[in-house]
Image (spheres, rainbow, N blue to C red):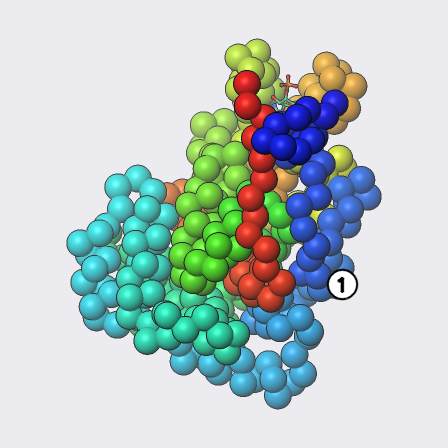
Amino acid sequence: MHFFAGGSYLQETKKGLEGIVALDTSISFIDGMQGILKYRGIDIEHLAEMSYETISYLLINGILPGEQELAAYSNRLKSERRINGEMIDIMRVCNYGTEALDSLRTAISCTAHMDHENDNNSLDANKNKAVRLIAKLPTMIAALYRCKSGDFPFQPDETLSHGANFLYMLRGEAPSAIEAEAIEKDFILSAEHELNPSTFALRIAASTLADVYSAIITGLCTLKGPLHGGARRGVMEMLDEVAVPENANNYVLYKLSRKEKIMGFGHRVYRTYDPRSRIFKDMAKRVAKENGDPTWYEVAESLEHVMYREFLDVRGRPIYPNVDFYSAVIYKYLRIPPELATSVFAIGRVSGWTAHCFEQYADNRVIRPRAHYI
Ligand SMILES: CC(C)(COP(=O)(O)OP(=O)(O)OC[C@H]1O[C@@H](n2cnc3c(N)ncnc32)[C@H](O)[C@@H]1OP(=O)(O)O)[C@@H](O)C(=O)NCCC(=O)NCCS
């Protein structure tokens, strides 16, 4: 149905903009029917075996780095990991209550104030800002956590990978090889996902020619909600609540009877298994095995089985775990506190966000849809 408003014919409202194609992108591709995800034309299964630094370079620059480019990029990221004493002072003052992301957005704002290129919107300056954000986000989050406990933050360790260094700064000890692999995969699989809500919000901000930091904070605030990135924390809390696999059945039935959402299930685009969930599930199983106590993994598997069965029975179609489900199981085994979960998601996503900023600036038209007046 079309209706007339303000001098032009408008299309029928699509609640939640479902199925609306809002823009062209070369950053990622999703086939929701077949469960395919590609960044810059490369399948996610292949990308998951690379380093986060490689993926970050790919997203921002559009091509995979050669050996020399990767070494140079890696060195730049490592040299930008540190945050200064003023920032740590600010973190002590603006420490968080129940959600670290509330302080992270303040920390990113402060980084903008301290960045001498903040007002320079050239591509070169913006790529420098991207490097600073990607490098500093793990340091900020670990520092926030340490300040919260009244401890001094650990300095970044340049000998460690992006993921391993984050876990080191969080705990003060280097992670095992499999833990380092798990967090690196988490950053890669979380790095980019087309027009998800936070990226769309960020692109709207960028389309007004707001600066990179403002756009990133827009994305970060949108990630917070429990129907988006906040679901990862919700899954961690659910794993604690369910506690043992035998409770999964009653938990799901109770929630569904009250028409409550079960965190970590369902997706607007995927009508089959999310390819990222498959990789996360396999990784979670391996981490659980190394840990020696598979309970959280088994609880998650039971929840998955019950959800599949209940949705198929009642609605005639199954529901699958999304990206937040088995990643949350991994966070449990990595001892990442739940209040940090959404912020840790942002460590990976910041590469995709900055890539979308640049794509928007490069071919901009302000994003301004219409509303149906009732
Ligand atoms: C991801 C999500 C927001 C997609 O939303 P959407 O495309 O708008 O899908 P809808 O919420 O309209 O879901 C369609 C139906 O399935 C139900 N449903 C979807 N996900 C569900 C879940 N996780 N638990 C229980 N029911 C769910 C909805 O209640 C709705 O039922 P209705 O037709 O009776 O109203 C939604 O699946 C959800 O809220 N999931 C839980 C939160 C989550 O994990 N978010 C992370 C996303 S990556």
Q: Please tell me whether residue 278 is drawn above or below residue 141 in the rendered image.
A: above
How many numbered circles does the render carry? 1
- Image check: 203 left or right of 58? left
Residue 374, percent from left and from top? 55, 18
Where in the figure is residue 82, as x and y percent of width and height? 34, 73
Q: Residues within 10 Å of mark 1 (few under 14, many from 20)?
A: few
Query: Which quarter of the rendered image does ligand 1 occupy?
Result: top right
In the drawing, does residue 105 fall left or right of residue 123?
A: left
| Location of residue 110 (image quadrant) | bottom left
Q: Is residue 3 above or below residue 170?
A: above
Identify the residue at image location x=74%, y=17%. 315
The residue lying toward the viewer, choosing from 298 and 31, is 31
User: What residue sits 65% from the left and 85% below the top?
Assistant: 67
Which residue does the numbered mark 1 point to in the structure image? Answer: 41
Instruction: Between residue 21 and residue 84, name the one nearer to us.
Output: 21
Q: Residue furthest top?
A: 257
**What SS does tag 1 mark?**
loop
At a point 26% along the width and 72% down the height, the residue shown is 84
* Image location of residue 296, percent across then percent down: 53, 38
Is 65 above or below relative to 372?
A: below
Which quadrant would residue 158 be assigned to in this image? bottom left
**Going by the image, does 325 lie left or right of 136?**
right
In this rendered view, identify the residue nearer to me: 107 or 232. 107
Residue 45 falls in image quadrant: bottom right
Quadrant of image for the N terminus: top right
Give the residue displayed 55% in from the left and 23% down from the top. Answer: 373
Amino acid carrying mark 1 in the image: Gly
At which x and y percent is residue 25? 69, 57
**In the rendered image, is residue 352 in sight?**
no
